[in-house]
Image: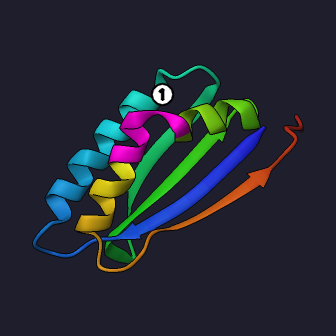
Amino acid sequence: MIIVVGSVDGRSESFEHLMKVSLEHVHRSRGEEGCIEHVVQVDCEAPLRLRFFERWRDAVALEAHFARPESRAFVQDVAKLCAKPPVMTIYEAEEKAF
């Protein structure tokens, strides 16, 4: 499984729009092949920051997600709405039941 975590810091004048395009992206991504989980949340300690958490079946599914024109357009939209560059980290993980 692949886990992606990231964050974007918005600007007060564009934060509502940033939330809107982020939610659209998340909802669209959930329907993609190999998407296990995809969420966006407002950071309680930094209210202009959105945090993303994603789980993908494998690297192939994530690469397909990144290659979609809609995903590329989302990245371009976010770049225009953020106060600074987005942060994203990708992990390879194994699920274990406890």
Q: Quadrant of residue 94?
A: top right
Q: Tell me the SS state at disc 1.
A: helix
- In the figure, residue 12 lies in which quadrant? bottom left
Q: Which of these two is toward me, 89 or 65?
A: 65
The residue lying furthest to the left in this view is 13
Image point (74%, 43%), residue name:
2
Q: Quadrant of the C terminus?
A: top right
Residue 21, relative to residue 87: is it above or below? above
Predominant SS along the magenta part: helix
Q: Which residue is mark 1?
A: 30
Q: Residue at x 40, y 35 (%)?
A: 69
Q: Residue 27, how many percent across, how many down?
A: 37, 31
The three-letter amino acid code for the residue at tag 1 is: Arg
Quarter the N terminus occupies: top right
Please state the horizontal and vertical placement of residue 93, each as a whole percent of the image.
Answer: 83, 46
Residue 71 part of the magenta-drawn span: yes
Instruction: Magenta stretch: give its range.
Output: 67-73
Q: Is residue 46 left or right of residue 65?
A: left
